[in-house]
Image: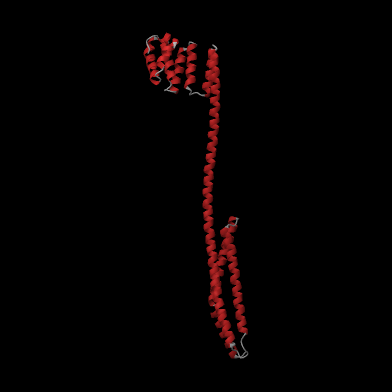
């Protein structure tokens, strides 16, 4: 090969190398970074066993960039070989046509490099957006799970309250039914039966001052005065504002002995203080007047 021809070809190679230097560096850099992204996304996918938005963006975005960069590099060398083949028999490049083509390739090379860089930045942006979206979804999912947990606790608490309320209603019904039956038995003269039924009612509703008062009066009528006093004090302990409780306590104390009259008087005054009409009720109650005499208001 003549020396001028070799020199011309070397000049052409040097010119082409400078012409595509920017694009070559950009494509090689983008390809390297894309490969790292691809391997990282693949590793995360294998580790998690599932693909999220970030993994899919990394896989497809980096694969596309690698493909595009490889295509542009192949196009660059193909054009370079065409230029080398355009040398004349005398060893020089065809001046006007080749210069025009080189300028066009230079502009195309710079545009391709910018597009490649823009594509890489776009993939990075998409990856960043996917990561941000994923974090937001994870945060919202955690908040939703927290709300669901609170809702489950509230539902469980509501179910417990409902069951508790049902139990209370059931006990109240049992207490009312037993109390009604006890009152009927008492008026029929079956005091022992009434006393047993009052006990059943108190088993269902032990803090019912009214039922304890009725139980105490049934004990009083059976002549079990100490038991009557004990039951009446429990009635007052269950409801210290129950005027009838103090009224019957005064009755039972009067029936105990004369030493209990001051305590009976205090109980009667307490009943009147709670309900003023109790004074007239005491005066109208024949049994109360007979047991307590005229010593009480």
Residue 285, position in %: x, y? 44, 12
Q: Nearer the viewer, residue 46 or 241?
A: 241
Chosen colour scheme? secondary structure
Residue 71, position in %: x, y? 61, 72
Residue 233, position in %: x, y? 43, 19
Q: Nearer the viewer, residue 157 or 21?
A: 157
Residue 24 seen in the current view: no
Asked if 90 appears above or below 232 in the picture, the reply is: below
Q: Nearer the viewer, residue 40 or 104?
A: 104
- Tell me the quarter of the picture where residue 263 sits: top left
The N terminus - image quarter: bottom right
**Which residue is at 48% across, 20% downward?**
210
**Which residue is at 53% across, 69% downward?**
118
Residue 78, position in %: x, y? 62, 78
Q: Nearer the viewer, residue 115 or 56?
A: 115
Asked if 106 appears above or below 46 in the picture, the reply is: below
Q: Number of marks in the image?
A: 0
- Tell me the quarter of the picture where residue 292 sits: top left
**Which residue is at 53% across, 57% downward?**
133
Residue 268 seen in the current view: yes
The C terminus - image quarter: top left
Asked if 35 appears above or below 178 in the picture, the reply is: below
């Amino acid at each position: 090969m003549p020396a001028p021809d070799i020199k011309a070809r070397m000049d052409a190679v040097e010119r082409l190398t400078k012409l595509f230097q920017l694009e070559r560096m950009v494509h090689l850099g983008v390809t390297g970074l894309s490969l790292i992204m691809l391997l990282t996304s693949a590793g995360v996918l294998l580790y998690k066993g599932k693909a999220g938005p970030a993994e899919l963006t990394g896989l497809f975005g980096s694969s596309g960039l690698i493909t595009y960069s490889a295509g542009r590099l192949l196009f660059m060398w193909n054009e370079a070989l065409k230029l080398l083949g355009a040398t004349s028999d005398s060893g020089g490049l065809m001046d006007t046509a080749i210069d025009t083509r080189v300028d066009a390739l230079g502009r195309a090379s710079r545009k391709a490099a910018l597009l490649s860089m823009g594509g890489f930045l776009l993939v990075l942006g998409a990856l960043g957006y996917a990561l941000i979206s994923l974090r937001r979804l994870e945060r919202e999912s955690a908040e939703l799970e927290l709300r669901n947990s609170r809702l489950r606790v509230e539902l469980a608490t509501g179910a417990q309250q409902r069951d508790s309320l049902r139990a209370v209603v059931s006990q109240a019904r049992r207490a009312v039914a037993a109390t009604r039956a006890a009152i009927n038995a008492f008026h029929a003269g079956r005091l022992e039966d009434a006393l047993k039924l009052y006990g059943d009612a108190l088993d269902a509703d032990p803090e019912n001052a009214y039922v304890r008062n009725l139980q105490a009066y049934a004990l009083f009528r059976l002549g079990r005065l100490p038991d009557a006093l004990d039951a009446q004090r429990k009635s007052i302990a269950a409801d210290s504002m129950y005027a009838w409780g103090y009224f019957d306590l005064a009755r039972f104390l009067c029936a105990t002995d004369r030493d209990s009259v001051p305590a009976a008087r205090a109980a009667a005054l307490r009943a009147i203080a709670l309900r003023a009409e109790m004074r007239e009720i005491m005066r109208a109650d024949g049994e109360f007047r007979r047991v307590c005499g005229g010593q009480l208001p």
